[in-house]
Image: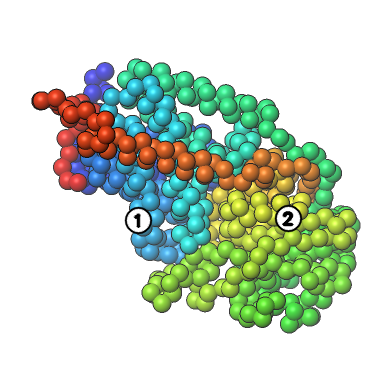
């Protein structure tokens, strides 16, 4: 069509310009962020990577493909973490660019698998290999020291029932593989020759059938009663004396729960600003609430404390208080938010504290996970997490394996109240619930607070960011386990195995080309492999 031809011609100069192509790569990399809350366009995840994959595929050189991958990864990191800008300012661009480097090898890999004359077999291989490369990138950048697993592509599917069933088999990692595989197949359907298109379509049919089989046959936890859990959300409390006024507001809200027969009351992160062991008067106030309501109260202490090993410093701790005071159950947060709760390599990067709201003093880490028993609820065991620990699949899995019947995450996103962060953070609990077949409670100071059943389904009505109040939820309990809880992160090892096989095959191919055993000498005048491919598929460009 003429209009389409004109649009294509309009893009040629842009693609040929290093600056224009780089800007397109950043923009294309940012597109998947629209699939996450708050926009919540979950369906967009299945096409969002297509522009970036097409761009990488068109690269004339491997160097250019790596650069496209890097810039695309930078755009992705900026988009899914943009709400950190008030805290980190321009430093967020530096961090995004550093993390974006992890996508440079993926750009090389995607170009290698998607470019050139593709047979049906190579197209089918691309639908497997390209997602494995993306998953390895997500795995590396999920390390806590690099910021943790916030914004994993599979997490965008938190409200899609078939995707949650996939998560029960292979965690969020398997969902990521599925999403990237669909995007890769669509690229082949758009840009590959007929045999490859047929293979891509066949791959989509096979993958969809596999998802359907998982939804129908994967083990499901069996219902096992309910527990009444109350969430107390005091809302925004600012200004002088805000810590004490927030505490008083939480007290008043908790008293309103009297007579509602709850089994547990949960306060949000940093709901108590003093060490309860050294302030018995504050502990007595919470214990009085426990007696009045008839349930233990799980609070969160953000203060200078001393742990069981004698270390003194600022800990963030989930502390259980019963009718008689401290129960002795305390969990100290293990995985801290870089810059928000500690500054990595503070001697070199401490200047970041002067540019934003980075931590002035490093918090101390807990030494291990803890499950807590509720004596007045039949010994029901809960597994506490603090803040972004709910983003780490392995932590919830460990708690479930240690006997936790309910996963409880205490959080505060008040610094990012009007951003996408509160909704996105709350959505993570749905994935952790589905992965482990255990209900999950996400309790915050200022919203969004939400509760999910053992299949990841939302229970009751969430408490939004404009709410100061309480919510009482009939939380469905479950017994049994999921395949993910039993087998762990097997998709990661499977993806690594696929990439190792590919590397071995490439090594053998390279050795043969270099004249290894059994290599055939090229005939005189033989053209190099894919000599005409670049001319046919990519516009001319300048720069790297």
Q: Of residues 463 and 99, which is closer to you in this image?
A: 99
Instruction: Label 1, secondary structure: give it.
Output: helix
Residue most extreme to the front? 517
Question: In this picture, is 183 found above or below 382?
Answer: above
Instruction: Give coordinates of residue 319: x percent, y percent.
Output: 73, 68
Dot 2 or dot 1: first in sequence order is 1
Characterize the local packing of mark 1: few (<14), some (14-19) or many (20 or more) Cα atoms within 10 angstroms.
many
Residue sitting at x 67%, y 54% = 398
Task: Please name the residue that numbered disc 2 is placed on.
Answer: 402
Disc 2 packing (10 Å; few <14; some 14–19; many ≥20): some
How many marks are shown on the rendered structure? 2
Report helix, strand or loop for mark 2. loop
In screen coordinates, is 518 left or right of 257? left
Tell me the residue at 81%/60% (across/down): 373
The correct choice, above or below, for 425 with respect to 207 in the image is: below
Mark 1 sits on what residue? 97
Quarter of the image with the N terminus in it: top left
Left or right of residue 5: residue 503: right
Q: Is residue 447 visible?
A: no
Counting from the top left corner in percent of width and height, residue 481 is at: 73, 42
Residue 512's x, y, as percent?
Answer: 26, 34
Q: Nearer the viewer, residue 393 or 324?
A: 393
For marks 2 and 1, give the one nearer the viewer. 2
Please give the name of the residue rendered at 60% of the width and 58% of the height, measured from the top-left corner: 389
As drawn, is 235 to the left or to the right of 67? Answer: right
Check residue 51 in the rendering and tell me which mark sits there, or answer none: none
Q: Does any portion of residue 113 appear in the rendered image? A: yes
Q: Is residue 201 above or below residue 354?
A: above
Q: Tell me how far mark 2 sits from mark 1, CA to CA.
A: 38 Å
**Residue drawn at 54 percent across, 41 percent down:** 491
């Amino acid at each position: 069509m003429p209009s389409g031809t004109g649009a294509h011609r309009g893009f040629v100069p842009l693609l040929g310009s290093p600056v224009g192509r780089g800007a397109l790569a950043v923009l294309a990399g940012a597109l998947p962020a629209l699939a996450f809350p708050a926009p919540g366009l979950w369906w967009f995840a299945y096409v969002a990577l297509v522009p970036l994959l097409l761009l990488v595929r068109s690269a004339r050189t491997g160097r250019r493909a790596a650069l496209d991958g890097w810039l695309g990864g930078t755009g992705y990191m900026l988009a899914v973490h943009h709400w950190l800008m008030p805290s980190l300012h321009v430093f967020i661009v530096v961090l995004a660019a550093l993390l974006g480097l992890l996508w440079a090898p993926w750009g090389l890999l995607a170009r290698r698998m998607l470019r050139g004359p593709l047979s049906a077999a190579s197209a089918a291989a691309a639908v497997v290999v390209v997602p494995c490369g993306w998953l390895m990138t997500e795995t590396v950048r999920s390390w806590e020291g690099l910021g943790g697993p916030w914004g994993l592509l599979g997490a965008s599917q938190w409200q899609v029932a078939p995707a949650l069933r996939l998560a029960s088999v292979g965690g969020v990692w398997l969902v990521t593989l599925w999403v990237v595989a669909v995007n890769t197949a669509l690229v082949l359907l758009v840009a590959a020759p007929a045999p490859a298109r047929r293979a891509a379509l066949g791959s989509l049919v096979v993958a969809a059938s596999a998802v359907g089989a998982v939804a129908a046959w994967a083990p499901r936890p069996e219902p096992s009663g309910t527990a009444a859990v109350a969430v107390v959300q005091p809302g925004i409390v600012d200004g002088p004396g805000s810590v004490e006024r927030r505490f008083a507001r939480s007290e008043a809200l908790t008293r309103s729960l009297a007579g509602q027969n709850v089994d547990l009351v949960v306060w949000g992160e940093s709901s108590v600003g003093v060490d309860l062991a050294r302030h018995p008067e504050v502990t007595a106030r919470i214990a009085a609430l426990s007696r009045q309501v008839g349930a233990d109260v799980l609070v969160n202490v953000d203060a200078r404390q001393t742990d069981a090993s004698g270390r003194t410093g600022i800990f963030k701790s989930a502390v259980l208080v019963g009718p008689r005071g401290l129960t002795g159950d305390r969990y100290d947060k293990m995985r801290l938010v870089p810059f928000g709760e500690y500054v990595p390599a503070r001697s070199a990067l401490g200047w970041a504290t002067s540019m934003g709201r980075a931590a002035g003093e490093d918090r101390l880490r807990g030494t291990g996970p803890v499950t807590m028993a509720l004596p007045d609820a039949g010994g029901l065991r809960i597994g506490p997490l603090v803040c972004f620990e709910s983003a780490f699949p392995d932590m919830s899995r460990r708690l479930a394996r240690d006997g936790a019947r309910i996963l409880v995450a205490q959080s505060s996103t008040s610094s990012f109240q009007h951003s996408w962060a509160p909704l996105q953070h709350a959505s993570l609990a749905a994935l952790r619930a589905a992965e482990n077949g255990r209900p999950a409670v996400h309790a915050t100071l200022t919203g969004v607070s939400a509760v999910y059943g053992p299949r990841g389904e939302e229970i009751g009505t969430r408490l939004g960011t404009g709410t100061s109040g309480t919510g009482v939820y009939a939380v469905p309990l479950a017994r049994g386990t999921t395949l993910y809880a039993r087998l762990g992160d097997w998709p990661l090892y499977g993806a690594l195995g696929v990439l190792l096989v590919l590397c071995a095959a490439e090594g053998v191919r390279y050795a043969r080309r270099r004249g290894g055993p059994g290599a055939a000498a090229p005939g005189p005048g033989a053209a190099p492999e894919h000599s005409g491919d670049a001319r046919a598929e990519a516009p001319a460009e300048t720069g790297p």
